[in-house]
Amino acid sequence: MASSIPKSPSLLTRTTLAVVGVILVVSAFHAFYIYTSERSEIIDDIELDVAESLKRLSKSLAPFIEAYSVNEYENLVATETALKRHFAVVVEDYEMGEILGQPYYLFGQLLQEDGEYLDFQTRTAPLTEQLDQAFYAGSAPIIGSTGGVLGEVWVYASDDVLVRKLDRVLLEELLTVLILATTLSLLLTAVLRRYFFNSILAIDAALKNSDQEGIPREPVPAFRYRELAVLSEGINTMVDSIKESRETLRIERRRLKNTITGTRSGTWEWNIQTGDTVFNDRWADIVGYTLEELEPISIDTWMKLAHPEDLQRSAELLDKHFRGELDNYECEARMRHKDGHWVWVLDRGSVQSWDENGQPLLMYGTHQDITERKQAEASLSMAAGVFRHAREGIVLTSAKGIILDVNSAFCTLTGYARSEAVSQSYEFMLAADQHSQGFRKQVLSSLRNEGVWSGECWVPCRNGSVFPSLMTIAAVYNSEREIEHYVTLFADISHLKQNEQQLRQIAHYDTLTGLPNRLLLSERLRHAVSTTRRHGDVLAVVFMDLDGFKAINDTYGHATGDELLVALARRLQTTLRECDTVARLGGDEFVVLLPELSSGTDCKPILTRLLSALSAPVDLAEHTVQVSASLGVTLYPQSPDTDPDILLRQADMAMYQAKQRGKNQVRFFNGMEAHAVNSRLIPPSSSDQSEKQPG
Amino acid sequence: MTLLIRRLLRIAPVIFILIGTLGLEVSAGERKLAYLVSDNRIPFWDIMARGIREQASELGYELSVHSADNVAKSELEATVAAIGRGVDGIILSPTNSSAAVTILKLAEQANIPVVISDIGAKSDNYVSYIESDNYQGAYDLGNLLASALHAKAWNNGTVGIVAIPQKRANGKARTEGFLKALDEQGVKSAGIYQQSDFSYRETYEFTRRLIQDHPQLRAVWLQGSDRYQGALDAIADAGKTGEILLICFDAEPEFIEMIETGALVGAGMQQPFLMGEKAVETMHRHLTGQTVEKVQRLPVLPVSGQNLKQLLPVIHRNVLGKTPQE
């Protein structure tokens, strides 16, 4: 930008030259006017001089002619001629001519080249020729005192005077013009420099003190004179405006750049009529190239890379845009990536300038890589399909737990119509009386911390029933990692639950008696141990084996034996407390857990009732049988390392002792540990004593 | 032979005319001169004409005298006539110096030499100009008057001047010469009046004013001669006769007696007869191929009571033109 300044002409020089030129032109016009005026005046003067001389001579010569004072009038003529610098004066003296015997006596004076006057008395041919060449001539008769014509006088004026005077006028005017032009130019230059150019230079200096973009750093100084002050203020206002505009432009440019960069948009400029095209780096990057690799770049670059089908659609849309049917051109098109795959771009733009014929000239637009979006759309389409066709119930809720949508499976499973569910709280999905507050907290905590919760949950139905479900609740985050939605997917697991219950029944309960089996016993024993340790009370583990069962089994068969076992199981269940557990280990072995005892002796009534219950006759379908039971009892707490298996073995050992001691009795474990226990828990009188039931 | 002589005699006048027309000098006796004088009724010019006749006759010239009687037309007509007659030379005493120019021009056109006697010309196309030495004459006259005043012991007396027009060269010369002498003699000038119409009345009035305005006036110098009576009468009327002296330039016949009686203390007398003779002589010399002076000044005689008798013969001939027979 600065390089052009030194080549620029100087305003001062131009102004001065212009002023000089104007002054010269004006002066020239003035000089021309003066010249013509002077010429006219001089001619008038010449004519007037001639007329006056004629008048004067005709009047003054007469007395001299009458007096024959030839020399006098000749002197007079000479004086008049010399005084007026006439070209020539000729007098024809009739009186003197009469004396001479001629028509007239002639006396003339003719101006010569040397400035002297030549007297002549005759009109020779050369003289006549010279006189004829006079610029102006006039004549007058010389009238005598008596009225007679005494002669005639001619006065000739040459243009020498005219030329000389005009030369003088020209010279004076030229000198005037020169002096005037010089003086005015100097004065004007000084004035301009003093009042104008110095100010301009100050403005120039202020403007030159500029930043890289040429914007002045400091404001233009204020000036004393109004016009310059207005100019200065105007420049400052303009500079301020430019600065603001530049800042705005910079912000907008940064925004645009950020937008382009942020949106990762490719940009293109297309001269529709020449095909010249400009892409940015991103445009090429979208299709895996660098701009250098795409050289030479033209509209053909686009056409080569675009999918033929999309190119056809693009052309149609462009045509509509050019015809004004579309305000903007927008086309989703596939482009061949450098790696060979297709990438989707959103090609958008509009014509920004038109030629004088109304044809589109320049068009600007962007390319946006929408491959992911396209893929997302495909995924979404799939998701929509899943949403619509899944057998699981799907509930879409807002971050605040408001149901936004439910799928048809939800409606099928719950019996609710979509309209009944939408806008309801998520509580709607949970069977209120089936879930504790802790459950809800757990769910929310999991969602909050992990973004997902999965578990079983009871789902209410429109008919008031509930069904178990395997539910997964997932939080859907936005780009700010804020929860936008929750997607709840649940499946009806009623059948699974039933199967599970059945399996659990099979696994934990004796299929014959329905009593807990060994597995469930172990769980409950561990639970009871744990609870006893925690509560500080006493647990009694009773190992029980029927006496005489084998005989019945052998006598009446297994069916009767089984029927007996079932009956005794019922009897045991009714005999024990609600908190007690009775399990069948197999055959005729049972274990009874008696928790929440305040002491070892508290179990004796129960044990007694057990012996009684088991030893009472049992009416079977076909038989009435009677058995007894040997009970081995061990108590807990014991040493800290005593586990449930040890307790069972201790009880088993005690039962064995009871068997050995005669059956139908209760025997407490009496090992080293048990002894210690017995000494503390069981009264010493009965510590080594088995309880024998009659019968 | 006789026939040849007869034929020659028959054509002789024609030959002579042709020779005369061509201006060839055949012999002195055949040469003609013309004297153009302004007015020979004036004694001065008449005396000069006599001198011219005398000398022309002596040198064998045929002379014709033409007096214009102070009329310009007559003077021009005389000039044209003289030229028409084919005179060999013209002696010119013009009516004025301006008229002389035209005459000289006409003569020049006719290739006729002109000698001017006394009145000058405003051109120089003449052979010679003969005049009185006015300056010297006036100077001598001034000295003469101063001596007279000193003789009367009128050392403080002043001199008034009644002058001819000072634009004329002779007037200017006279005044300058006279004043120079007065200055050298320590005599003061009282004042000067310039004549215009040369009348008695004018002379009388100027003299009266000088007497009236200058009590110390002891002399009046009249630069002309013909109106001396006006000055005398003014002096007499002022009762200053004998107390104021009168001195004149030029001469009148009665001046001799007046100088003798003391009525006139002196006069500067020009010599017209001598001037006429000198003019012809000069023309003759010119026509005979001799060199002549362009200007010849003849002395003016300062005549006073002291030198009157001595100069009287010269005065009679050269001033008054009286031949010995007269």
Image (cartoon, rainbow, N blue to C red):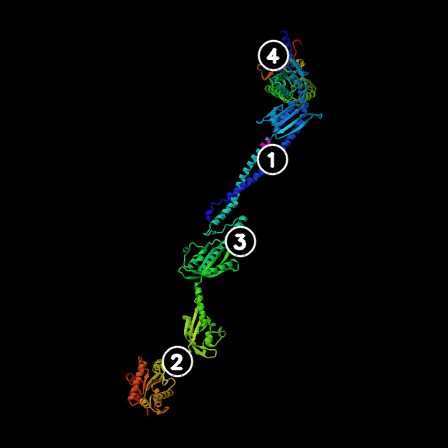
Q: Which residue is mark 1?
A: A38
Neighbour tally class for label 3: few under 14, some 14-19, many 20 plus, Cα within 10 Å? few
Q: Which residue is mark 2?
A: A501
**Residue under pointer 4:** B26
Chain letter of disc 2 in the image = A
User: Where does residue A685 sit, x and y in percent of width and height?
Assistant: 30, 89
Counting from the top left corner in percent of width and height, residue A393 is at: 45, 74
Q: Earlier in the sequence, mark 2 or mark 1?
A: 1
Q: Which residue is mark 3?
A: A357
The magenta-colored residue range is: A160-165
Residue A466 in view of the camera: yes
Report whether B95 appears left or right of A559: right
- What's the CA distance linking mark 3 and mark 4? 119 Å
Q: Look at the numbered disc 4 and give the secondary structure of its residue.
A: loop
Q: Main secondary structure of the magenta part?
A: helix
A567 and B296: which is toward the camera: A567
Label 2 element class:
helix
Residue under disc 2 on the same chain as residue under disc 4: no
Which class describes the residues within 10 Å of circle 4: few (<14), some (14-19), or many (20+)? few
Residue A34 in magenta?
no
Which-is-in-front pick, marks 2 and 4?
Answer: 2
Cβ–Cβ below 8 Å for labels 2 and 4? Answer: no
